[in-house]
Image (cartoon, rainbow, N blue to C red):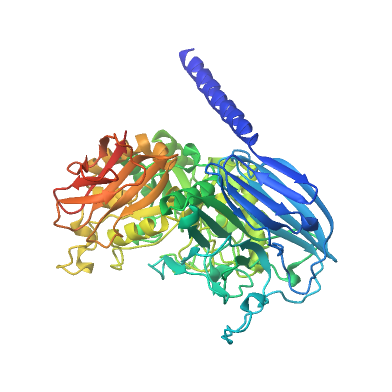
Amino acid sequence: MILKKHLFFCILSLFLISFLDLKAQQESLSDIKVRLQNDTLYLQNKYVSFTYLWNNGNLILKEAKENTTAQKLEFSNNKIPSLYLPKEGVVTSEAKMEVEDKRTFPNEYIHKEVSIYFKMASLEVKHRIKIYPNASAISHVYFLKGRAKASVWVKNREVELKMIEKNHQNDATESERIGNIPFDGNHWKTSIISFKEATDYHDNLVFEKEILPYRKKQEMSGNILLGIHPRKNTAFFLIKEAPIAHSQQYYAGYDFQIDHKSITVHGIGIAPKDLNNEWIQGYGYAIGLAKANTTELQKTLLTYQKQLRKHIPERDGMILANTWGDRSKDSRMNETFILKEIEQASKIGITHLQLDDGWQTGLSRNSASKAGQKWDDWSLSDWQPHPERFPNGFKNIIATAKKKNVKICLWFNPSKANSYQFWERDADILMDYYHRYGIKVFKIDGISFVDKQSEINLRKLFTKVMLKSKGQVTFNMDVTAGHRVGYHYFNEFGNIFLENRYTDWGNYYPHRTLRNLWKLSGYVPTQRLQIEFLNNSRNSKKYPIEDVLAPQKIPLTYTSAITLVGQPLAWMEVSNLSNIENLKNQLTVYKNISNSLHSCIVLPIGEEPSGFSHTGFIAYDTKRPKYIVLYNEYTEQEDFKLQIHGLKPEFNFNRILGNTMSIHKDQEDSDKIRVNTKKPFDYGLFSID
């Protein structure tokens, strides 16, 4: 009877929490206004307002306003519409607008969705705009169907360097355009941020380039563009919501064109040959406004991205172990081994255990077995538990994992045959494991955007699973090789499996993992990144004896602490760990604050990690700093200073993790803190009150 009452109150509590959350979201929707008056479209929420000339559906940006500061950018002379498709003409017809309250999936953030429909001759266009209540940004994406006049919309062209007397502003683009953002006056500074995936081959993932706009159009490749005007105290950002350049369809060689008059966004990711009678989704972009301060601009940028997939702790929060990091491949993959892994994972405090490649009947070409040949094409029977390795199916491991409070996750490689034509079958396979065993986390490997149809079908696969599971599934999107999702595409489906690193190959250095996380953190929410730590007692002979940064010389509590602002990934066979007490204590404490930490906006502070630096992260809860995590790499300096944006005159630091590092207020500068550390490879996680 007592147990039934407890269960009743638990269910009631969950219902009340969901009800109150829904009520709060509905109330915040009241701040969103969409109004078409005469020939002007007004879009606004509590934070930003955008005004467009209707132009029979093909919008022309006229004004952008940051509502909290009343800073305004005016473009009264702008006559250039957002969408341009070569040879399709500029005359539009049959324009209409629909406005709905929508959720991407059942448990995601509610938002306003504005759909504008119009025609260009026999080509039909749908312009979808999303407005979230709690973001200083709106997003734009175009869908196309019907017939095009042109046979091609994208042409790579040579950059011309003609005489200065030429009016470069009239240079016509030969590529399609999906956005036009004029400059309000001169003296803007812009930065372009581009990214690398295929992390098996790249260990420099973020590239930042400053551009001062000039008369000649500059063609720039990147997913993010930042603009700052210090005099106007105004900044804006653009996110090209697409794969990185390497993986985009029909890529013209650039994402933005910049001159002193405007920025244009290019690359719709659709060709006329793709069109039919169904809506084809192209690439889009988000535009947001902030104060002319790098910290505030990055906070605004990240806040917008966090709206695209709500962080639901019981779904998205995980400390995941994956056995592949010890390089046994699938040679130990069987029920007995996995039961040992579950036992040890439970002792350490690991929340999820992932069975990587090798659990399935159809062995892949990465298998330790010579029988492994599969990769691009799989059958339904390939995706059954391997009969010799798991003679009881998953019955025993699921039951044991449930008792030990560990969730089982699976590796999956969708079939590439004919541009993923079997997407629906693959979605059904995943849903079968969801229904039969309650498996909700799937690592997605091997995908490749080889053509537009591949992209379309993969989106259908992931969307079907999310809808059928009522949004309960998380996909770990592997970006280690091939043409994949990058960092700003398919964000609504899960998180990013960032990199494979191995002590066996001597290519794992904790500071390099920290550097990748640190560099990405200004542009990608850290809770979307799975960050690895390894069993660093292995393979000491693979590193030079004099190498002070060799992983074997660094405490496991430090190497695992590098991952805390991301999603920690124990990239190892955890049953091989011998001394687990310190790691267990660390993860026990971390789990108590991880949900709070992941609800924050996390930004990099200090020096870029190099193995010999003072570095870390600051986590902001709305406007104020809430947590700080600091790392002292291999340095002999016991005291150092760090600048923190947004500290109150009176504040206190409370140690959550770490033993010797301490933080004090700097008496000379209220924006700085003094850090004291006693040894190399020391760290501290602190709350800020």
265 or 661: which is nearer to us?
Answer: 265
Q: Position of residue 16 (x, y in %)?
A: 56, 23
Question: Image height check: is 681 above or below 106?
Answer: below
Q: Is residue 127 visible?
A: yes
Question: Image height check: is 483 above or below 678?
Answer: below
Residue shown at 54% from the left, 26% from the top: 17
Q: Quadrant of the C terminus?
A: top left
From the viewer's perspective, tell me whether residue 464 is left or right of residue 221.
Answer: right
Q: Is residue 571 visible?
A: no
Q: How many marks?
A: 0
Residue shown at 34% from the left, 49% from the top: 617
Question: Image height check: is 623 above or below 335?
Answer: above
Residue shown at 73% from the left, 76% from the top: 152
Q: Position of residue 442 (x, y in %)?
A: 51, 51
394 or 72: which is nearer to us?
Answer: 72
Q: Position of residue 610 (x, y in %)?
A: 27, 63
Q: Position of residue 501 (x, y in %)?
A: 35, 62
Q: Quadrant of residue 368?
A: bottom left
From the viewer's perspective, tell me whether residue 30 is left or right of residue 92.
Answer: left
From the viewer's perspective, tell me whether residue 265 is left or right of residue 311.
Answer: right
Residue shown at 62% from the left, 83% from the top: 166
